[in-house]
Image (cartoon, rainbow, N blue to C red):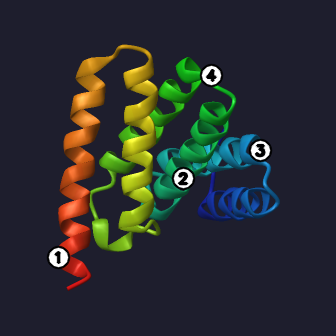
Amino acid sequence: MMYSDLDSHVYALASMCAQKLGSNEIASAYAEKAVNADKEGHNENPRNRILYCTTLANLGMQNLASNDFQKAFVLFSGAILNYQSVQTKETNNISNEDVLKMYLAGRYAAFRLGKTNESDQWLRAAKAVQGIHAIQSK
C-alpha cells in the first residue's frame, strides 16, 4: 500500500485523539500506522516516532498496573527503542521527566522478570536523563 504524507498526518491525529480519550491500544495502532506511512513515503517524521514511543509506554504502564510484567517489558522495550532511534532530539515532543519515567518503569518490569542486563542498562539511561534534567532546570 502506498502512503502519502497526508496519511501519516491523519494517522498521527487519530492516534493523538485516541490517546486523549484514554484508548491506548487504538492510539498505539494508529501511531504505528503513522510511522509505517513515514517509512513508505521515505519521509521519517521524528514526531510520529515519539508519538509511537509514548503510546507504547502508556500501554506498558497499563500492563505494569495489572502486574503483567512480561507484556510491559515488551512494550517498554519497543518504546525505548523507538525513543532512541530518533536522531533529532530538539524535535522530541516528550519531556525529560516522561523519558525518565519510561526508563524507570521499563527497568522495573525488567527487574521483576530477572532481566538484569536490560534493568541495568535502563537504569544507566535514566541516570543520564536525570543528569540532563538537573542541568536544564538550573
Where residue 135 is drawn, which disc sits there? 1
In this rendering, is residue 18 above or below 111? below
Name the image quarter holding the N terminus.
Answer: top right
Q: Residues within 10 Å of mark 3 (few under 14, many from 20)?
A: some
Quickly name the residue at label 2.
Answer: 54
Q: Secondary structure at mark 1?
A: helix
**Left or right: 38 as drawn, with respect to 65:** left
The residue under the point 21% across, 72% down is 134
Quickly name the residue at label 4.
Answer: 68
Number of marks: 4
- Residue extending farthest bottom: 138
Where residue 26 is drawn, which disc sits there? 3
The residue under the point 29% across, 26% down is 118
**Left or right: 111 as drawn, with respect to 36:** left
**Left or right: 128 as drawn, with respect to 86:** left
Percent coordinates x, y for residue 108 in the rendering: 42, 32
**Left or right: 112 as drawn, with respect to 54:** left
Name the image quarter holding the C terminus.
Answer: bottom left
The residues tagged by marks 1 and 2 sit, at their Cα atoms, a distance apart of 24 Å
Percent coordinates x, y for residue 36 in the rendering: 56, 43
Please state which amino acid type lies under the numbered disc 1. Answer: Ile
The residue under the point 42% across, 68% down is 95
In this rendering, is residue 7 above or below 23? below
Sequence-wise, which precedes: disc 4 or disc 2? 2
Percent coordinates x, y for residue 12 in the rendering: 65, 60
Q: Are marks 4 and 3 in contact (CB under 8 Å)?
A: no
Q: Secondary structure at mark 4?
A: loop
Closer to the eye: label 4 or 3 = 4
